[in-house]
Amino acid sequence: MNNSLIYIVDKIGEGKKLRFYLKECKDLSSRFIRHSAENHNIFVNDRVELLNYKLKLEDKVEIFLDKDEKQEIEANEMELDIIYEDQDFIIVNKPPNLVMHPTKSHLNGTLANGLIYHYRKKGENTIVRLVNRLDMDTSGLVISAKNQFTHSYFSNMMKTEDFIKKYIALCHGTFKDKTGIIDLPIFRENDDVIKRVVDERGKSSITKYEVIEEFKDASLLEVMLLTGRTHQIRVHLSHLGHPIYGDKLYGESDDLDIIKRQALHAYFLSFLHPKTGKIMEFKGQLPCDINEAMKKICFK
């Protein structure tokens, strides 16, 4: 079955050039339109048309999304916890200690390697286009787009209020204010250093939190990112004196008897489907190691 976008031209689009109609009326990116035209994937009334074609009322505009694509990533068989999948994207619940994409030190065994294997096994000739990224030791929901249109759509949606992502974090100490917004700029002092700091020279960084459970000297938070800086949750909570349990970079050294990685899980996603506009919501189960960490804290 072909995967495509189909539009029927109404009075607003009548008389407009195809390029203008797709960009201004359908909010498609210039890059996507150009690439689709170059690959002869744009049809009007079942015929390939140039972008300067002048549209008529009730013309059928169809853009085919499937195309042969190659990516230099080796396919590795891997058991994926797939939360949702359709023609346009896949959502996977990433376990901790899994790198997202191949690097010089991790050429194989990454999430991308596993996704390529999954696609090839299904006979889908697509590539990995990660929409959101998580640190190796952070678990949770990850989206990968299956075509350029969907990837561009998500890139734009992530800048709007319609895209919501929430995390669960187990951190040290208890909070006086059980809900709050942390609005502190985050800065990287040296290009060669991974660690970030709160510094007025940094970029605006806003994190919203709510305490959902308290222990003797720990708190379980629901955290929502209003901006998307590297290590944002970890930096903000550490700066406030509430580092995440198991965080080797921003936390405390004696946490390893509680949990072996930072107790941070991307558990919730909400957005509008790229084709239907329907609200999609997904929740992931809290990993076993975070549940075990809470039990250990209760019995300390």
Image (spheres, rainbow, N blue to C red):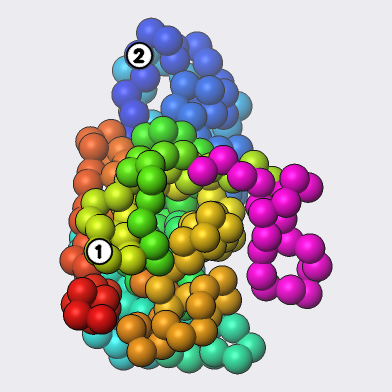
The percent coordinates of residue 298 (x first, y second) are 20, 74
Kindly indicate the quadrant of the structure image that contains residue 23.
Answer: top right
Could you tell me how far apart the alpha carbons at marks 1 and 2 are, in whole angstroms? Answer: 59 Å
- Residue 58 is situated, as x and y percent measured from the top left of the image, at 32, 17
Magenta stretch prevailing secondary structure: loop
Q: Earlier in the sequence, mark 1 or mark 2?
A: 2
Report the span colored magenta.
Answer: 182-202
**Vertical side of 294 occupied by 64: above or below:** above
Question: Picture quarter containing residue 197?
Answer: bottom right
The residue nearer to you, when weighing 87 against 242, is 242
- Residue corresponding to mark 2: 10
Q: Which amino acid does label 2 sit on?
A: Asp
Left or right, 70 with respect to 203, comes to left
**Visible in this render: residue 179?**
yes
Marks 1 and 2 close (CB-CB < 8 Å): no
Tell me what residue is drawn at x 80 percent, y 67 percent.
190
Q: In the image, which disc is placed on residue 215?
A: 1
Type of amino acid at the residue the image marks with label 1? Phe
Q: Residue at x 33, y 66 (%)?
A: 217
Q: Quadrant of the C terminus?
A: bottom left
Residue 258's tag is: none
Residue 18 among those drawn in magenta:
no
Q: Closer to the camera, 81 or 208?
A: 208
Q: As displayed, is residue 187 above or below residue 37?
A: below
Residue 276 on image: x %, y %: 25, 36
Q: Can residue 65 be seen in this view?
A: no
Residue visible at 36% across and 89% down in the picture: 257
